[in-house]
Each structure stands twice: as C-alpha cells, then as structure tokens.
Image: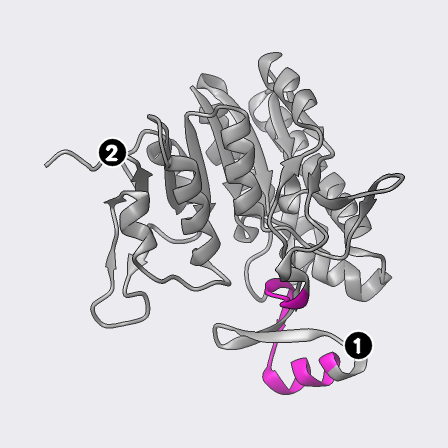
C-alpha cells in the first residue's frame, strides 16, 4: 500500500513553545516513532508543515518566502530523515520540492495562511503596523497571515516517483513546497506559503497513493466544533463533508484536502492524531473520508 502522511505543525512545535532545535527534534523523534511501523510495511511519503518555523525566520532574516520555504524544508527534512534512520533503521531521503502556483491566484490579494508565533492582539497590531503585516485572530490569539495560493503542480514529481519506487521512505513538499510560478526565463519564486494539506492531496493523487493521512493533535473532525453539541465525525463522503463548514485556519484545509483526494476510486483519506497513524491507515480511527458510504 502506498501512503502519503502529512504532519501538522504540532509534530514539530506545539502552540506557545519556544522554537529551539532540541524541542523540535524531540517532537520529530515522536513523529518518526509513530510513522516507522507504516514505513516498514508500506511505501511511505511524508510531508510536513512549517508555519511556526517560517514565520520566525521571516522576522529574524527577512528573506523572501520562497527562500524561507527552502530553508525550512531542508532543516525539517533533515531532522525527519535522521530520526527515521536512527530510530527505525529506515532508508529515508529528503527531496527539496517546488510547487507551481498561478500568478493570478486571488489568494495573493487575500492573505489567509497563518505563519509564525502567536501574539496577544495589542502586540500583533503593533508588529503589523511596524512591519506592514496582515494579521488575523487564531483561536484566542493573533498571528501573521500571508498569501496561500492553490497548488497547481509539483515540479519534482518525476523524481519523487522514482524515489518512492526505489523503496525509500521519502520526505518531500514540506510546508506545501517552495512556491514558484512560470516566468519568461523559467520558474521564479513568489512571496507565499502554500497550504501543506492541499499540496499533500495533490501529491497523493499524482503518486497514485492508496491512503492520505492528515495527522494533527485531535482525535477526529468534529461536527459543530466549539458548541455543546459537538460530536466526532467517524466516516463521511466528500459530498457530506462539503455541506458542513470548518475553520479556514485549522480544520478547513484538512477537510478540503481529504475530500479532493477521496473523490473517485477506492482510495480514502483519514484525519486524526499523529499517535494513531497506524490505526488511521487501517481505517479504524479518526475521521475516514471515502467516496463510498460506510456500510450500514
């Protein structure tokens, strides 16, 4: 079975944690421990978020977001392949990956992707005024937001196919991939961060994966999240999920990615806890999204 697993930002840095390398490497070791059983039994492709890391580097370095995307892919990819090799003896490889976006994507006029640390509202507004940021509420806190265009293609896709077919565990497309667009002289980087879950869905479809895992820090998608009547959704078709509303900054992209991947065919997507990765791949935990309704 071929599996694409997308690690949420919590796999590397929990909300409010200091962004030190030791803390992040500790989380990477835990992620590798959860993924190793899948890698031993199946073809595994791993992608990951980079929101906290890229936002902090943007403040410290001021580099363009395509460059910061490359930096975080290398850093986090290194930690992941090192952990998978040392912890489980796996043959793992990190492939620096570019994601093609369209220059006229409306997302460039409406920043929505959270990056960097959380702030109280007063601090966020002060920083936004000083640095010309766009900011938005993120739960009870505030964060910077940047454009997040749709992933239209994966530049390194032929190389990724060959790497998977070689038997290696492949880490790629971190942070949604380095955003690039077509230009007269080839490809050029753009100031954006592509949503890693949407890129993961595109990657999984292009690699003909059987399962897409969207791994986070909650057991399952909830219907009526934040209300007294909230309940976990254990199984749904893409059509059923599209009739519901989910927060854009958190569960919304995961649900959209799951629906895109699961539409048509026998494949399915699963949303749930990183620690439940094996059970999610077996379809026994989390929220399972498939084109076929669950048998009654």
Taking the magenta stretch, the answer to whether it contains residue 220 is no
Instruction: Decide: few, some or many residues near mark 1? Use Cα within 10 Å; few <14, some 14-19, many ≥20.
Output: few
63 or 179, which lies in front?
Answer: 179
Q: Percent position (x, y) of residue 195?
A: 58, 51
Q: Decide: is 158 above or below 120.
A: above
Q: In what quadrant of the picture does the C terminus appear?
A: top left
User: Residue furthest toward the left?
Assistant: 296
Q: In what quadrant of the picture does the N terminus appear?
A: top left
Determine whether the residue tagged by mark 2 lies in a helix, strand or loop.
Answer: loop
Residue occupying image coordinates x 53% and y 53%: 10
Q: Which residue is mark 1?
A: 131
86 or 52, which lies in front?
Answer: 52
Kindly report which numbered mark, 1 or 2, lies closer to the viewer in this rendering. 2
Q: Is residue 228 left or right of residue 270?
A: left
Q: Earlier in the sequence, mark 1 or mark 2?
A: 1
199 or 263, which lies in front?
Answer: 263
Q: Which residue is mark 2?
A: 292
Q: Is residue 48 left or right of residue 183?
A: left
Residue occupying image coordinates x 39% and y 43%: 259
Taking the magenta stretch, the answer to whether it contains residue 112 is yes
Residue occupying image coordinates x 62% and y 20%: 161
Asked if marks 1 and 2 touch (Cβ < 8 Å), the reply is no
The part of the image, by quadrant, that contains residue 98 is: top right
The stretch of residues the image draws in magenta is 109-128
Instruction: Decide: few, some or many residues near mark 2? Use Cα within 10 Å; few <14, some 14-19, many ≥20.
Output: some
Residue occupying image coordinates x 26% and y 45%: 236
State the CA–CA distance, disc 1 to disc 2. 49 Å
């Amino acid at each position: 079975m071929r599996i694409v697993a997308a690690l949420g930002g919590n796999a590397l840095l929990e909300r409010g944690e200091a962004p030190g390398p030791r803390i992040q490497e500790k989380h990477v070791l835990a992620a590798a421990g959860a993924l190793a059983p899948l890698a031993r039994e199946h073809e595994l492709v791993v992608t990951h978020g980079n929101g906290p890391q890229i936002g902090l580097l943007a403040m410290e370095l001021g580099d363009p977001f395509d460059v910061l995307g490359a930096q975080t892919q290398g850093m986090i990819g290194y930690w992941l392949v090192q952990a998978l090799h040392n912890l489980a003896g796996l043959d793992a490889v990190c492939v620096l990956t570019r994601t093609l976006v369209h220059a006229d994507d409306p997302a460039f006029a409406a920043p929505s992707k959270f990056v960097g640390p959380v702030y109280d509202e007063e601090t966020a507004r002060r920083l936004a005024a000083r640095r010309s940021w766009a900011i938005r509420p993120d739960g009870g806190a505030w964060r910077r937001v940047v454009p997040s265009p749709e992933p239209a293609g994966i530049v390194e896709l032929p190389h990724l196919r060959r790497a998977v077919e070689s038997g290696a565990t492949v880490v790629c497309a971190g942070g949604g991939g380095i955003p690039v667009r077509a230009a007269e002289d080839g490809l050029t980087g753009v100031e954006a961060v592509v949503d890693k879950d949407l890129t993961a869905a595109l990657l999984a479809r292009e690699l003909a994966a059987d399962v897409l895992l969207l791994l986070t820090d909650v057991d399952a998608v909830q219907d009526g999240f934040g209300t007294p009547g909230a309940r976990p959704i254990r199984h749904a078709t893409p059509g059923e999920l599209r009739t519901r509303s989910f927060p854009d900054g958190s569960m919304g992209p995961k649900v959209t990615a799951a629906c895109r991947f699961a539409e048509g065919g026998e494949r399915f997507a699963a949303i749930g806890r990183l620690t439940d990765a094996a059970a999610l791949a077996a379809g026994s935990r989390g929220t399972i999204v498939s084109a076929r309704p669950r048998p009654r």
